[in-house]
């Protein structure tokens, strides 16, 4: 990994899996290789599928305990630590970029990183030495999330890595311990790949209607929603979009992209 960010940082959308991602024989190495190819961020701004809060909220700007927002897993997953530095300067920039009449921004100072944030970060930046700020999704409306991404875009020129963290398909009924992939997951993943390659933002914004079995691939849309923050932050550069990780994990598409 380079020692300092130079020029504009890319924007990422990644599929974050679940705590057992750490035990997968392939996925952690894919995430580590991805981060090794990135310029070193000055700070990381995370938008996770697992934090919906309105008005838009900023998480802790000091190091606080992680949020173990999952149940029924083996004990060692609850012992994971990721004590990244807080990012108070980034928080102030985000407030200035997002706060507007009728658009408040709130602070929740004891809200730590949830698993949608720390699970991939542990694999990508294991030293936990880069300041991290998590912000909530105040809505699941793709157009509004796209606008939030647009307003955050200047951060990319300031060395900030903007990461939307979700899952490219997310229907827990399709989870398969033997890796069986349903036609719904495969067809949605292929449709999404083609829409991204075609830079068809209109289709992506209307994915529930235009994608094959869109409402089955995402019965609730919170795991696809962070993609629109990423696309907004990188609007105008969608011709520089590429898939970095693809394939499936326990039957769900783990497609993850980089723009810029």
Image: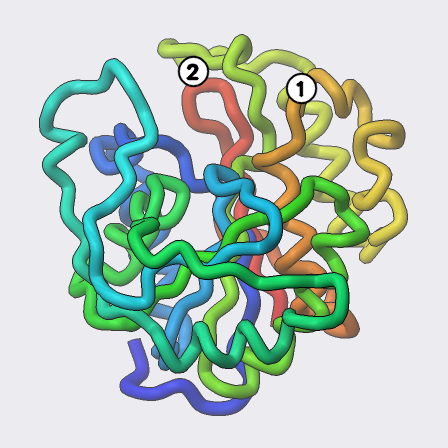
Query: In whole angstroms, how far apart are the C-alphas of marks 1 and 2?
Result: 20 Å
For label 1, the residue is 219
- Which of these two is toward me, 226 or 108? 108
- Which of label 1 and label 2 is nearer to you? 1
For label 2, the residue is 179
Instruction: Using residue 43 as the reference point, say whether residue 212 is left or right of it.
Output: right
Q: Quadrant of the N terminus?
A: bottom left
Residue 99 percent across, percent down from the top left: 65, 71
Under tag 1, what secondary structure? loop
Under tag 2, what secondary structure? loop
Residue at image position (40%, 42%) is 116
Residue 85 percent across, percent down from the top left: 23, 69
Q: Quadrant of the C terminus?
A: bottom right
- Residue 73 visible, this angle: yes
Q: Is residue 135 above or below residue 76?
A: below
- Residue 240 visible, this angle: no
Instruction: Using residue 211 as the reference point, say whether residue 42 is left or right of it.
Output: left
Residue 180 percent across, percent down from the top left: 49, 11
Instruction: Using residue 133 as the reference point, say whether residue 191 is left or right of it.
Output: right
Q: Residues within 10 Å of mark 2 (few under 14, many from 20)?
A: few
Residue at image position (82%, 45%) is 205
Residue at image position (50%, 36%) is 254
If you read the primary sequence from the N terminus, does the residue marked by circle 1 or circle 2 appear first?
2
Residue 256 percent across, percent down from the top left: 53, 48
Give the numbered dot on residue 147: none
Q: Residues within 10 Å of mark 1 (few under 14, many from 20)?
A: some
Q: Is residue 26 above or below residue 159?
A: above
- Which of these two is toward me, 79 or 52? 52
């Amino acid at each position: 990994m380079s020692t300092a960010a130079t020029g504009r940082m890319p924007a990422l959308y990644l599929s974050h899996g679940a705590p057992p991602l750490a035990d997968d024989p392939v996925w952690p190495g894919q995430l580590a290789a991805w981060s090794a190819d990135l310029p070193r961020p000055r700070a990381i701004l995370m938008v996770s599928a697992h934090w919906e809060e309105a008005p838009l909220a900023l998480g802790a700007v000091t190091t606080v305990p992680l949020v173990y927002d999952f149940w029924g897993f083996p004990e060692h997953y609850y012992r994971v630590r990721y004590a990244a530095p807080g990012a108070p300067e980034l928080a102030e920039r985000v407030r200035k970029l997002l706060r507007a009449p009728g658009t408040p921004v709130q602070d929740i100072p004891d809200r730590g990183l949830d698993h949608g944030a720390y699970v991939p970060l542990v694999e990508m930046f294991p030293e936990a030495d880069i300041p991290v700020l998590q912000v909530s999704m105040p809505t699941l409306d793709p157009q509004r999330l796209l606008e939030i991404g647009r307003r955050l875009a200047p951060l990319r020129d300031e060395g900030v890595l903007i990461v939307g963290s979700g899952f490219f398909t997310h229907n827990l009924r399709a989870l398969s311990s033997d890796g069986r992939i349903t036609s719904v997951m495969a067809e949605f993943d292929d449709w999404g790949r083609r829409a991204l390659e075609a830079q068809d933002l209109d289709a992506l914004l209307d994915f529930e209607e235009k994608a094959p079995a869109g409402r089955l691939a995402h019965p609730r849309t919170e795991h696809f929603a962070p993609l629109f923050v990423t696309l907004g932050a990188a609007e105008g550069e969608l011709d520089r979009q590429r898939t970095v990780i693809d394939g499936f994990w326990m039957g769900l598409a783990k497609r993850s992209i980089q723009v810029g």
